[in-house]
Amino acid sequence: MKTKINFGNLVLVLLVIVLALLLFRECNKKVTPPITTPTVVQVQEQAKDEVINKAIADSFVTVINHEKNESAKWKLAYEDLMTDYLNAENDAQNVVNQKVPDTCAEYQRKVQLEIQKLKTTNANKDKAATNTIASLSKQNQTKDNFLKEKDRKYGQLKLRFDTCIFNAAINEKYIKKNKPKREISIGVSAMTNFADILKPAIGLGLGYRNKKGSELIINYYSNNIGTATLKIPLIKF
């Protein structure tokens, strides 16, 4: 007795085999994950950098404060020397202005002229020294302002960095929790023929879904009918 091959069933079986091969071929594709640095590692590295940066900044501040103190000492010493110099200059001027015999008058005028030249030269020198001290003081003040502004900007960047790390950590937890996973499912279904007498049939289904969302479902019904369904995501939103 010859066995009749149902062409429809054969097509169904072949279709199931082809779809299964396509599905599992898709599952075997390896997707290279992006190379990222975990937030925990970033926080650790940032903490190390902050310690190093603070040590460097403290050393700069120490040097600057030392130079400021030295400048203040030299400025005070300069002011004391100026006081002594002006007193000595007045004493010398008083001495050369004293009345002398006529025979010494010419020499007195020469000495007075030379003293006046020295006073002019010293006045210019003192003015240059005063301007230099003022310029150095201004430089020190500018450095102080720069360091304060640098600390303020660093504080802003640190706050933004901490916020980014906090958000990244939340995203990592969310992604890890909602990461796509493979899934095997089982289900119950029913079917009937509305064109003739109702003959309901109950089916048991077994499904497999890969990480990309593609799903293959095989159903077998009580009326010896089998179905296969392949679902592939079309639009995700």
Image (cartoon, helix red, strand yellow):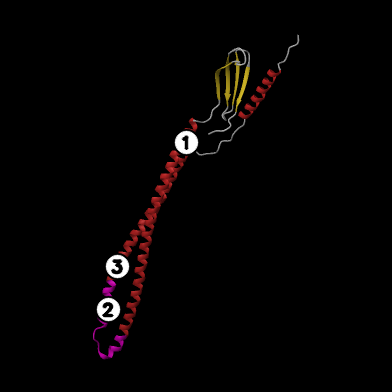
Relative to 106, is 140 above or below? above
Q: Amino acid at mark 2?
A: Ala
- The main secondary structure of the magenta stretch is helix
**Secondary element at image label 3:** helix
Q: Nearer the viewer, residue 125 or 94?
A: 125
Give the residue at x 36% y 59%.
141
Relative to 185, is 142 above or below? below
Q: Amino acid at mark 3?
A: Glu
Relative image position of residue 78 (x, y in whole percent): 31, 67
N-term-proximal mark, 3 vs 2: 3
Residue identified by numbered label 2:
92
Mark 3 vs mark 1: in front:
1
Q: Amino acid at mark 1?
A: Asn
Q: Quadrant of residue 87?
A: bottom left
Residue located farthest toward the left when viewing the structure as drawn: 99
**Secondary element at image label 1:** helix
Residue located farthest toward the bottom when viewing the structure as drawn: 103
- Residue 108: say if magenta: yes
Q: Which mark is residue 79?
A: 3
Q: Nearer the viewer, residue 5 or 210?
A: 5
Question: In the drawing, does residue 77 fall left or right of residue 211?
Answer: left
Query: Within 10 Å of the Cα at label 1, are there few (<14), some (14-19), or many (20+) other Cα atoms?
Result: few
Relative image position of residue 114 (x, y in whole percent): 33, 82
Q: Which part of the image, by quadrant, shows the N terminus?
A: top right
Q: Which residues are magenta?
A: 84-109
Relative to 33, is 62 above or below? below
Residue identified by numbered label 1:
171
Question: In the drawing, does residue 130 fall left or right of residue 37?
Answer: left
- Residue 226: say if magenta: no
Q: CA distance from mark 3 to mark 2?
A: 20 Å
